[in-house]
Image (tube, rainbow, N blue to C red):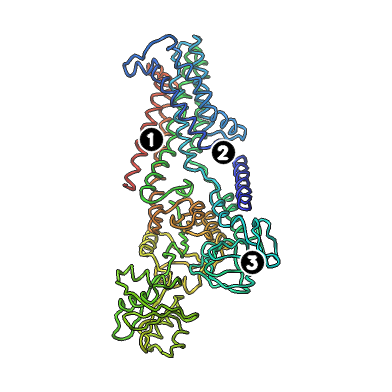
Amino acid sequence: MPKTDHQHEHHHGNDRDDHGDHHEHGHDAHEGHSVEAFRSRFWLSLALTIPVVVWSPHIEMLLGYRAPVFPGSAWIPAVLGTAVFFYGGLVFLRGAWSELRNRLPGMMTLISLAISVAFLFSIVVDAGLIDAVALWWELATLVTIMLLGHWIEMRSIDQASGALSELAKLLPDTATRIVDGSEERVPTSELSEGDLVLVRPGESVPVDGVIRSGTSTLDEAAVTGESRPVERGEGDAVVAGTVNGDGSLRVEVSASGDDTKLSGIMRLVADAQSSRSRVQHLADRAARLLTVVALAAATVTLVTWLLIGADIDFAVVRTVTVLVIACPHALGLAVPLVVAISTTLGARNGLLVRDRRGLEAARDIDVVVFDKTGTLTLGAHRVVGISVADGVDEDDAIRLAAAVEADSEHPIARGIVASAHERELEVPSAEGFKALPGRGVQADVDGETAYVGGPSLLESLGVEPSDALREAADDAGSRGRAVVYLVRGDGVEAVIEVADKVREESREAVEALHARNVRVAMLTGDAQSVADAVADELGIDMVMAEVQPEDKAARIEALQEDGSVVAMVGDGVNDAPALARADVGIAIGAGTDVAVEAGHVVLVRSDPRDVVRIIDLSRATYRKMLQNLWWAAGYNVVAIPLAAGVLAPWGVVLSPAVGAVLMSASTIIVALNAQLLRRAMPG
């Protein structure tokens, strides 16, 4: 099926690109491993670690208990610790090999060095070659906590090609081809240029093409961003992935498969995702520095003690203590813990973080670009203005218009009816409903005939609006609003302005962003007059209207050229490339699945004000990350010299076990500090 082919093609293409980029930069510590792999390794390692800790003599001494004794119980730490090393630690050993192969040692190298030294040291101790305490429980807990940290990390950044699969779903698997007057159902992949296909009411258009017969309204919002269904007839072009309305269309194929406009959008999404800059994590940089420091300190420790005549046992124990205490227990959790907590806080406040890189970048946002339809606006028609004749009440006019339009399926009619209900108006029943093709509708309400329609309705009825109503209609038209007239008796009673209604929260969102020195732009496929009207109402700084889907990502890129950090907020398929291209892609949760898949953050409530909450959460998260990283790496400034034995002449010597305790204490401090992030966004 075509969509499956598309999906697989782009998915594997992205995989190749991602891995290629990581090889080039040498920091793909998780290459070849999935979230599930880290999760399963963590749980099994945890199960093996618990007995290691329980039967550890050092833990027994610290906590003052005695573990059950039975034949072979003394070997539990060594046997299960070895299992944890080879099973849970294998991913870190492989990652270290990859880092060393690329000459960029980092977190994986330091973790692998610490667990390998602890493993070999413990074997030597148990063999009686060195008089010291084995480090089995330190080894096992280190591996398990590192697995937990990397599982949390991978889960937060895991990003499949969901956007591409959702895009592919818009294309139907099969189509009805007309050959010599007869119909046949064929796979979409078999269609070729010049074929004639039948598109029935409610079906998705399977190809790009030209209508050869039939008229209908097409919902093109998913592909073009046009908020209103568009009338299409003979000779008009149609686009694959749009949804046919009430009419039946015969379309001549001009492009199918990879050549369609929708497939072009899919390629843009794939390109934007793969070309997006990859943020080098602060923890990786800190770990790289700490690796160099730890290795240098360990080497200096060993050489120094041997040179001044210390026993080999003492020198080796000092060296091992340095490596163990420098291992990034806390560093491995410093960032993932904050990410996990901030992700949870965001979810409780209607912000679903799909990709942490977007959340990290949000603190530096300079420009927020909003899609108009469905984001700043409801994406549905509503009465946005009304002018009435003398002696006519506005609510009465809307109530009457809604009664006349109640049986109509036209989008404007549904908008008038919905507005009446939202105003909690009691809509009277109507009789004798009749559609007037090309003019409007009529119905009898309270024994009197009323009409609702456009200018052609007035011509057919031979009535003229007052100068004030005509002026109101002209003004509304200049702002891109649809205008309908309410006629009763021999006069025009009201001019009703219908448009895609601006969300009540949008103005507050724009003001809050301005208060944070963030510029606000609007990007839409709608007409310039419609976009300008919305921008004027909300105080938006920049307007980019009549922008085609394939140009949206380019507009985002242009804003980024001066170094600006750009966020894109959208809800439609046509927004997906721009969402992926932006530094921060923010998808409206009530929008299409593909926009949600392409965004870094999803707004569950479809509330533009949540964009401000994202920025605030990002800034608080970044501050907490820095604090944790400073502590996780900074405590080594004191701990490493102590572990090396600088105070040994005064009788102060840290054993490897005490070093492991200090390392664990650092982890606890980092964890508690991460919890303080909850103050930034209660709930």
Please report whichever mark, 2 or 3, sits nearer to the chain's N-terminal start.
2
Residue contact between numbered discs 1 and 3, judged by CB atoms under 8 Å? no
Query: Which of the two residues, 290 or 648, is positioned nearer the viewer here?
Result: 290
State the CA–CA distance, disc 1 to disc 3. 60 Å
Question: Compared with residue 180, is residue 431 higher up or lower down, i.e. above or below?
Answer: below
Where residue 591 appears, x then y in whole percent? 46, 58
Kind of residue at badge 3: Gly
Q: Amino acid at mark 1?
A: Val
Q: Mark 2 or mark 3, which is nearer to you?
A: 3
Q: Is residue 194 left or right of residue 135?
A: right
Residue 629 appears in view: no
Q: Contact, CB < 8 Å: mark 2 with mark 3?
A: no
Q: Residue tagged by mark 1?
A: 670
User: Mark 2 to mark 3: distance in Å?
Assistant: 44 Å
Residue 614 or 404: which is nearer the viewer? 404
Residue 645 is drawn in which quadrant? top left
Give SS at disc 3: strand
Task: Please give left or right for residue 54 compared with residue 106 in the image.
Answer: left
Q: Which residue is mark 2?
A: 28
Mark closest to the chain's N terminus, 1 or 2: 2
Badge 2: residue crowd in 10 Å (few <14, some 14–19, many ≥20): some
Residue 80 placement (x, y as % from top left): 47, 19
Q: Residue at x 53, y 32 (%)?
A: 108
Q: Which amino acid type is marked by label 2? A: Asp
Residue 494, disc:
none
In percent of the image, x 59 and y 50: which residue is there?
275
In the displayed structure, does residue 468 sit left or right of residue 550?
left
180 vs 455, nearest the viewer? 180
Q: How many neighbours does mark 1 have within 10 angstroms: few (below 14), some (14-19), or many (20 or more)?
A: many
Q: Is residue 330 above or below residue 463?
A: above
